[in-house]
């Protein structure tokens, strides 16, 4: 029977992980997670005490567990298992092989306390301040966009859907069932542009754009053009209008005046808002119905697209690399889920930025 690993065995394993390029080791070296201690302690102090009492684990340790969940799209149960199973997770959290691992319920309770305290905005603001202290000022203007974050689809009757839209709980739902139903998530339509094949007959019928129904929430973000870091964000139901969120996403601390966004944000109200704030609008212009877009405007949109495309890298990283999905119920919990994904993206972006400037 194999014995317990000794100190040198564990050291050898850590060295092997480092040699393989453990991304969590690099993350821990670049991001000072202690900057979150103050906001975390304040949030936990103000939160309502649950039946289980205040978790005995260090708040920064618990916060780093939420970071792991965001980076690897883990449920609470999967998080508990992975911490016990993966040496890289244990090292990132500062846990030894004989250390006590927070169980799934403890992780859930910790996140619930942050939800009740509405702490995610302060945590995000604290890290943004830390970025500025390190010289990563918001510069070069800002790019605004939104994307749908999927959630498990609800199987409701037409009567139940009507009640939810009216803000009511369906009468036939018992309390236990109501707790398992997400009444805040909504359906939305995502349009996928159909591309014309190169060399296709110009007289041939053009392919039809695809309309893809999606259920869940939206992540609204604003990134700075210079560093590609998320500076402002918000969460909403998936059917929220993107353009109405522009004033909330504009950062006045950005040293550049330019604002880039797609046609969903083009409106007289938004243009007036930007002009009043001394911002320069680079929002895409729409073509008029049944009329081709003038060549001058089409070329201008193309130039804007080359800059605006930077924000798509954020969403691609969150969806494909981090597997962002909302498994929780309700907008309050979805907000902290989306907020943690935005924080985790900024952590990884900072690692990349620091690596780019590090001496060879």
Image (cartoon, grey):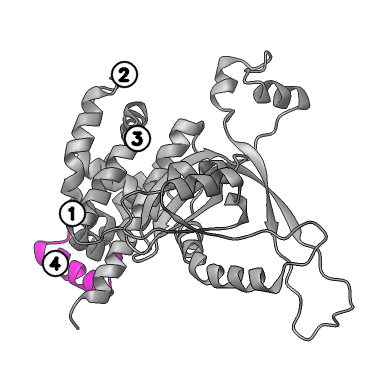
108 in relation to 281, above or below: above
Disc 2 versus disc 4: nearer the observer:
2
Mark 2 touching mark 4, by CB under 8 A? Answer: no
Q: Which residue is mark 2?
A: 51
Determine the residue located farthest toward the bottom in the rendered image.
199
Indicate the secondary structure of the residue bearing disc 1: loop
Indicate the secondary structure of the residue bearing disc 2: loop
89 in relation to 294, above or below: above
Q: Which residue is mark 3?
A: 111
Instruction: Name the residue at 29% across, 69% down.
Output: 353
Residue 61 screen position, x and y as percent: 22, 44
- Whether residue 98 is visible here, answered yes or no, is no
Marks 1 and 2, how far apart at CA: 32 Å
Instruction: Name the residue at 47% across, 49% down.
Output: 274
Q: Residues within 10 Å of mark 1 (few under 14, many from 20)?
A: few
Q: Residues within 10 Å of mark 2 (few under 14, many from 20)?
A: few
Marks 2 and 4, how far apart at CA: 40 Å
Residue 199: mark: none
Q: Which residue is mark 4?
A: 11
Q: Earlier in the sequence, mark 2 or mark 4?
A: 4
What kind of secondary structure does the magenta stretch mostly adopt?
helix
Task: Confirm whether the magenta stretch covers residue 229.
Answer: no
Disc 3 versus disc 2: nearer the observer:
3
Q: Earlier in the sequence, mark 4 or mark 3?
A: 4
Mark 4 touching mark 1, by CB under 8 A? Answer: no
Q: Which residue is mark 1?
A: 32
Indicate the secondary structure of the residue bearing disc 4: helix
């Amino acid at each position: 029977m194999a014995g317990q690993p000794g100190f040198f065995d564990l050291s050898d394993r850590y060295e092997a992980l480092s040699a393989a390029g453990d991304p969590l080791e690099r993350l821990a070296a670049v991001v000072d997670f202690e900057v979150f201690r103050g906001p975390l302690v304040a949030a936990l102090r103000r939160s309502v005490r649950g039946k289980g009492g205040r978790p005995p684990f260090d708040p920064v340790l618990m916060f780093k567990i939420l970071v792991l969940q965001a980076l690897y799209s883990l449920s609470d149960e999967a998080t508990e298992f992975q911490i016990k199973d993966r040496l890289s997770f244990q090292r990132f959290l500062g846990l030894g092989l004989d250390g006590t691992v927070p169980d799934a319920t403890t992780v859930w309770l910790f996140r619930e306390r942050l939800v009740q305290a509405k702490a995610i905005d302060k945590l995000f603001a604290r890290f943004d301040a830390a970025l500025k202290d390190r010289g990563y000022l918001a510069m070069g203007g800002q790019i605004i966009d939104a994307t749908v974050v999927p959630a498990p689809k609800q199987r409701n009757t037409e009567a139940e859907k009507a009640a939810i839209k009216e803000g009511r709980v369906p009468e036939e739902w018992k309390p236990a069932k109501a707790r398992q139903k997400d009444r805040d998530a909504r359906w939305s339509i995502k349009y996928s542009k159909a591309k014309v094949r190169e060399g296709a007959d110009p007289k041939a019928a053009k392919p039809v754009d695809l309309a893809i129904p999606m259920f869940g929430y939206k992540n609204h973000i604003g990134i700075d053009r210079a560093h590609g870091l998320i500076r402002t964000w918000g969460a909403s139901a998936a059917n929220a209008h993107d353009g109405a969120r522009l004033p909330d996403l504009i950062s006045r601390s950005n040293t550049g005046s330019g604002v880039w966004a797609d046609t969903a944000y083009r409106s007289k109200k938004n243009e007036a808002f930007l002009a009043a704030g001394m911002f320069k609008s680079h929002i895409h212009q729409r073509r008029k119905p049944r009329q081709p877009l003038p060549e001058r405007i089409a070329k201008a949109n193309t130039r804007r697209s080359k800059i605006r495309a930077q924000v798509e890298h954020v969403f691609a990283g969150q969806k494909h690399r981090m597997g962002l999905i909302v498994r929780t119920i309700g907008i309050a919990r979805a907000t902290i889920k989306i907020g943690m994904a935005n924080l985790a993206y900024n952590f990884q972006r900072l690692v990349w930025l620091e690596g780019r400037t590090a001496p060879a």
